[in-house]
Image (cartoon, grey):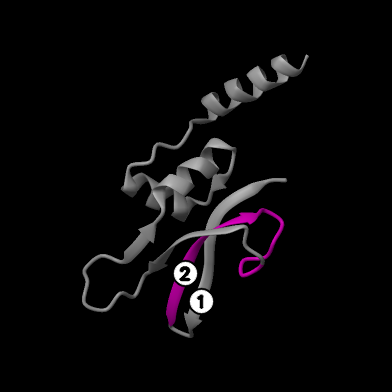
Amino acid sequence: MAVVLRLKRFGRRNRPFYRICVMDARTRRDGRVIEELGHYDPVNSGADEPAFELDTERASYWLSVGARPSETVASFLKRKGIVLPSRSERRRARAARKAARS
């Protein structure tokens, strides 16, 4: 099962609010969630920068087991200081798992 970290939209028209969620890649945008990691308010009243909150410990766990973040969620992770695994690191890990099975 391919797992992704992405945004789930809430709020009303012209006033969006998003939850940062762990979902199966095949579910629709506002569909069933495996786990909610935080929220993002792009129209935060009274602040210069949009507010977001993220459980970094759980996000790191999901990245370690192979979840892929969307572009927006990846930028949030980067702002919180979480280093995303590079493509070459993922390939090496996959090759190591495959060799261990053989």
Magenta-colored span:
15-31
Identify the amino acid type marked 2.
Answer: Tyr
Left or right of 96? Residue 82 is left
Residue 28 is a magenta residue = yes
Image quadrant containing the C terminus: top right
Question: Which element is circle 2 on?
Answer: strand
Question: Which element is circle 1 on?
Answer: strand
Image quadrant containing the N terminus: top right
Q: Disc 2 versus disc 1: distance between alpha carbons? A: 6 Å
Residue situated in front as seen by the camera: 45 or 101? 101
Q: Position of residue 80 (x, y in %)?
A: 33, 48
Q: Say above or below: 1 vs 38.
A: above
Q: Quadrant of residue 39?
A: bottom left
Q: Position of residue 45 (x, y in %)?
A: 26, 79
Q: Are there few (<14), some (14-19), or many (20+) residues within 10 Å of tag 1?
A: few
Residue situated in front as seen by the camera: 64 or 79? 64
Q: Position of residue 70 (x, y in %)?
A: 52, 51
Identify the amino acid type marked 1.
Answer: Phe
Q: Position of residue 83 (x, y in %)?
A: 40, 36
Q: Residue at x 51, y 41 (%)?
A: 61
Q: Are there few (<14), some (14-19), or many (20+) residues within 10 Å of tag 2?
A: some
Extreme residue in the bottom direction: 13
**Which label was assigned to residue 1?**
none
Contact, CB < 8 Å: mark 2 with mark 1?
yes
Closer to the chain start, of discs 2 and 1, is 1
Left or right of 35? Residue 43 is left
Residue 20 is a magenta residue = yes
Extreme residue in the right direction: 102
**Which label was assigned to residue 10?**
1
Q: Residue at x 48, y 85 (%)?
A: 12
Left or right of 80? Residue 68 is right
**Which label was assigned to residue 18?**
2
